[in-house]
Image (spheres, rainbow, N blue to C red):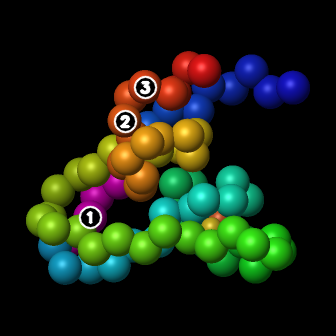
Amino acid sequence: MSTTKKVSMPVAVEAGKTYSWCTCGLTQTAPLCDGSHQKTADLQPLSFVAEQTTTVFLCACVRTEDPPYCDGLNCDS
Ligand code: FES
């Protein structure tokens, strides 16, 4: 069992651009989708459009209640 703690990850985004957040955990470019979900039968990325050019903190544990953003509540559980 891995003891690596998964926490939020900062991602620089541009206003109006669409991003795909990985929901399957297989991506090699976390927290964004790299297409590896195609190995699974039922998981798809969550697409979102950045509202402004900034740095957002995306969930890396996939337990957030505010996907794709880290809610800060489930990182250590
Ligand atoms: S690689 Fe995980 S959803 Fe695409």
Q: Nearer the viewer, residue 13 or 48?
A: 48
**Residue 31 versus residue 37 in the image, above or below:** above
**Residue 75 versus residue 50 in the image, above or below:** above
Q: CA distance from mark 1 to mark 2?
A: 18 Å
Counting residues from the start of the chain, the first of labels 1 and 3 encountered is 1
- Report the mark closest to the observer, 1 or 3: 3
Extreme residue in the left direction: 52
Q: Position of residue 34 (x, y in %)?
A: 61, 72
- Give the image quadrant in which the ligand numbered 1 is located: bottom right
**Secondary structure found at label 1:** strand
- Asked whether the beta carbons under mark 3 and mark 2 sit within 8 Å of each other, the answer is yes
Which amino acid type is shown beneath numbered disc 3? Leu
Task: Please tell me how crowded label 1 is: few (under 14), some (14-19), or many (20+) other residues with Cα within 10 Å.
Answer: some
Which residue carries the number 2 mark?
71
Which amino acid type is shown beneath numbered disc 2? Asp
**Residue 13 versus residue 6 in the image, above or below:** below
Which residue does the image show at 81% across and 71% down from the upper left?
Answer: 40
Which residue carries the number 3 mark?
73
Which amino acid type is shown beneath numbered disc 1? Val
Q: Which mark is residue 13?
A: 1
Counting residues from the start of the chain, the first of labels 1 and 2 encountered is 1
Quadrant of res 1: top right
